[in-house]
Image: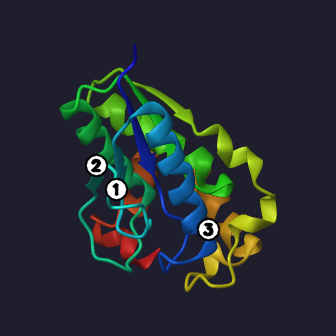
Amino acid sequence: MDRIGIVAFAFGLPPRTITNKIIAYIASQNADRCRAPIYTETNIPVDVAKRISWHPGNFGEPVALLDLAMGAAEWAEKNSLDKLLVATAKPALGRAMRDLKHALNERGVSIKVEPCIEIDFYYRGVWFSPESVLARSRFPLVWWSREIILRFLPMFLYKRVASYSNPVSRHF
């Protein structure tokens, strides 16, 4: 039987947005069903009764997908997990999956990565929340104009601009 973990990526700020509540719900449901721990950031309002590992960062500040993926890969390796289920907004799913697989590959760890199927149960428009303080998670046009660039960058360049731990990326 696979040892499963859930990785939840926020989509927008603050944590109380409907989008982040949906992601928290999806992560919690999968954690209950699979009896799995959750790795996430403070911007996901997950029930604190769950087994949660928090990614380092400040409450109310965005966490780069790549940074969370790197932390999740280390967490998964330490916990000897065989499979990770990704909970995030549908627009961020492709890059979250790619970043997580890359982070695992960099660590030389062979762990399966799959999306939480419940992501597809939600209407496409629900993911962009007018409550978000980040324009990219409020307006699809802003998201996709940035996302297309990030998805097509070669990984060596992407890593330079997509990680908040890299000072260069703070300006992108």
Label of residue 19 in the image? 3
The Cα atoms of the two marked residues, 2 and 1, are separated by 6 Å
Measuring from the top left, give residue 35's x and y in whole percent. 39, 34
Proximity of marks 3 and 2: CB atoms separated by less than 8 Å: no
Q: The N terminus lies in which quarter of the figure?
A: top left
Crowd tier of the residue under label 2, counting other residues whose Cα lies within 10 Å: few below 14, some 14–19, many 20 or above = many
Q: Residue at left 38%, top 47%? A: 69
Q: Residue at left 34%, top 56%? A: 67
Proximity of marks 2 and 1: CB atoms separated by less than 8 Å: yes
Measuring from the top left, give residue 56's x and y in whole percent. 23, 63
Colour scheme shown: rainbow
Residue at disc 3, secondary structure: helix
Badge 2 is on which residue? 71
Badge 1 is on which residue? 67
As shown in the figure, which amino acid type bears the numbered disc 3? Answer: Thr
Seen from the viewer's position, the closer of residues 80 and 159 is 80
